Image: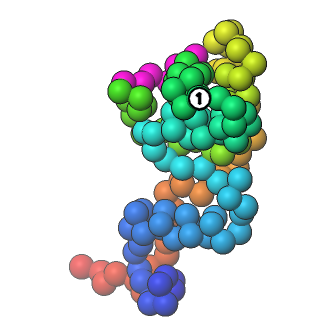
Amino acid sequence: MLFGKIRRARISSQSWKRAMRGVFRENFKESELGVRTKKIIELVTQKIFELDPSKAEEEAKSLAEAAVNRAGIKTKNSEATALFFMSAQQAKNLAELALICEKDKKSFKRLLKITTASKSLFLDVWQPMSLPLTRKPPHR
């Protein structure tokens, strides 16, 4: 198989994922992509500013942190406690719920599940793949 313009028998999972991220960036709009980060509060805060520029920085950050926590994502020092994959649409949806002062935790959790389920087709790309060898191994 050709990979990186070189014939290879095996490809590491890291190099495969890196190549696929490049393909996604080339073929999808920025709004359809997501990021893997602990700084999801910053993403939601940014969306709050885009939706309502009149909000003060501290107020927007407070709303974002409350929205993230209501969605069931644990935070510490204004960051998620673990890496989290969040799409731009998920961040925008959380920001919208925060701005309407929604308090129901189920609404936040349902929102993350709905937007994640609609993009589940991309998860197939990350499954391990087996590649055929270019030649058979010698018999012993």
Q: Is residue 63 left or right of residue 6?
A: right
Q: Is residue 71 left or right of residue 3?
A: right
- The residue under label 1 is 56
Instruction: Tell me what residue is drawn at x 24 percent, y 79 percent.
Output: 140
Q: Is 74 inside the magenta-drawn segment? A: yes
Q: Is residue 110 something that shows in the picture?
A: no
Instruction: Tell me what residue is drawn at x 58 percent, y 35 percent.
Output: 45
With respect to residue 87, does 73 lie above or below?
above
Instruction: Tell me what residue is drawn at x 30 percent, y 81 percent.
Output: 139
Q: Compare residues 77 and 116 and report the one nearer the observer.
A: 77
Q: Is residue 73 left or right of residue 29?
A: left
Q: Residue 60 location in percent, x, y?
A: 58, 28
The magenta segment: 69-76
With respect to residue 33, does 117 lie above or below?
above
Instruction: Tell me what residue is drawn at x 63 percent, y 64 percent.
Output: 24
Residue sitting farthest toward the left: 140
Q: Is residue 85 something that shows in the picture?
A: yes
Q: Is 25 inside the magenta-drawn segment? A: no
Q: Residue 14 location in percent, x, y?
A: 40, 63
Residue sitting farthest toward the top: 104
Q: Is residue 85 left or right of residue 118?
A: left
- Tell me which corner region of the image, top left, top right, bottom left or bottom right, holds residue 135: bottom left
How many neighbours does mark 1 have within 10 angstroms: few (below 14), some (14-19), or many (20 or more)?
few
Q: How is the image coloured?
A: rainbow
What is the secondary structure assignment of the residue under circle 1?
Answer: loop
